[in-house]
Image: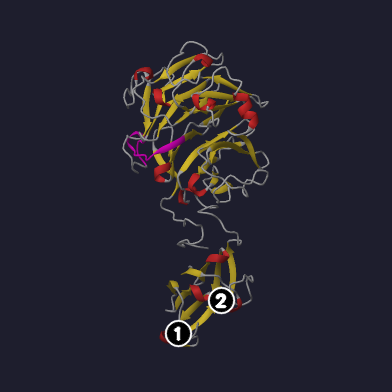
Amino acid sequence: FMGDNGPAYRASIAGPTDVAIDDNGILYIADRNNNRIRAVDTQGMIRTIAGTGQQDYNGDSEVARDTNLYLPFGVTMDQGGKLLIIDRSHYRIRRVDPKRGSIETIAGNGAKKFAGDGGPANGAKLSFPHGIEIDKKGNLLISDKGHYRIRQVSPEGIINTIAGNGIRGNIGDGMTALEASIYGATSLKLNSKEEIFIVSPSGFTSIIRKVDENGIMRKVLGTVDQHYLDSIAKSKYKGKVQTGELAIITTFSDIAFDHNDNMFISDRLNHQIRKVSAQGIITTIAGTGESAYYGDGGPASEAAFRDPSALVTDKEGNLYIADGANNMIRKIDTKGIITTVAGNGNHEHSGDGGPALQAGIRNMDYLAVNPAGELHIVGMNSHRVRKVTKDGKIETVAGRGLQGFFGDGGPATKAMLKSPTAITFDAKGNLYISDMGNSRIRKVDTNGIITTFAGTGTFGWAQDGETVEIYFQNFP
């Protein structure tokens, strides 16, 4: 650092990142690595107007030259002729009155926010969003899988992190959710208490964790927990990998809750469905363990599946199962009887507009039921969302089957999605899609029009939440 009070062309500047000119022709420079704002007057002379060169936060001093800045990288003039400074690593916006030399903080409290937290959701950065849910207050919950966080979008459209510290792992049970680490949260589900349940892998096992009513992260169940293994060992039928000589292998592919807070778990490897009662009793309720298709019209416990995965329940308590390798959707009613409700068994996309039982369903990666009671099917590799109407017909509600990003502002059926992973509905029936490949949450309103609800768009926030571009327009 050198050159103040002399010709600007002889001064040293370290990492200048932005400039602004006021109405008098004075040039202001964000001299980032010197932690200063420099001014060059119309005679070509340079001086420091804000910053001491030190980084430690010392508040707003009486004069801007005595106030520490930390990597200031952006400057602009407001309509009153005052200079606005992005004091980046102090996480504040400062305002300097060039005439008086005074400084004040006008935005930010020094707390670092992540990837758009605290701002509009349609300007936030998402990374491989997966699970998605809406709570009773209308908050949209998102598993921001690639960022190892759970994010929440308020009804006003503001996004914040509510769980996860951004570190990959499944550590921190018993701590606040924001202090705990999260890894690979593929599915989010809510019970009647509005507790958030997270399904994620952990090495070669699967675990279910929850954020309880007090915001504390808790472990619920793991595939290697002894009481779980003892419980499924009592099943009448056992899957082949459950009876291995070296190790018992089982998995949690998805979960769903009924209105009595019974939790259902799909075990894709063993082709079975487990139930964890509200009292914690674990039983196997469906699947003989054989990889096959039979049993319709009889007890689900005597039926066979091939790779059951996605689960959902309706208001009546019926359980729907994506019988993946059979390319069918099965239903277990409240009496335990199983039937097929969609899919002809062919691995293809066909049959829109006709009976769901005669349609081909290529992918069924997620299931959801809308407020009207219609079953919806997400095909990640088909890049579509379809639904089964109350009269048993099947139709596409979003996506044209080609991957990409296209169609915002128009009909959802003509839009392009890229690897959608999950959906949910608000109380009004609006559909929200976790458009993973596009790192966006898309919204389809009740008129069938699609827009981007959250994720990178026209409002840019940086990925790490530190470096941002801010444009001031009619700033007070």
**Residue 119, horizontal then vertical, whole percent:** 52, 52
Q: Amino acid at mark 2?
A: Gly
Q: Which residue is mark 2?
A: 51
Q: Residue at x 61, y 48 (%)?
A: 178
Work out how far the residue at label 1 is from the one at label 2, CA to CA, in angstroms.
16 Å
**Residue 46, horizontal then vertical, whole percent:** 47, 84
**Residue 35, horizontal then vertical, whole percent:** 53, 74
Q: Amino acid at mark 1?
A: Ala
Q: Residue at x 50, y 62 (%)?
A: 475
* Mark 2 residue element: loop
For the view shown, which residue lies furthest in the bottom direction?
6
Above or below, comparing residue 274 to residue 425 in the picture: above
For the view shown, which residue lies furthest in the front direction?
245
* Mark 1 residue element: loop
**Residue 112, horizontal then vertical, whole percent:** 57, 59
Between 442 and 180, the residue placed more toward the observer is 180
Q: Which residue is mark 1?
A: 11
Horizontal side of residue 382 vs 321, given as left or right = left
In the image, is residue 421 part of the stretch drawn in magenta?
yes
Q: Which residues are magenta?
A: 409-422
Above or below, comparing residue 288 to residue 376 in the picture: above
In the image, is residue 328 part of the stretch drawn in magenta?
no
Disc 1 crowd rating (10 Å Cα; few below 14, some 14-19, many 20+) is some
Disc 2 crowd rating (10 Å Cα; few below 14, some 14-19, many 20+) is many
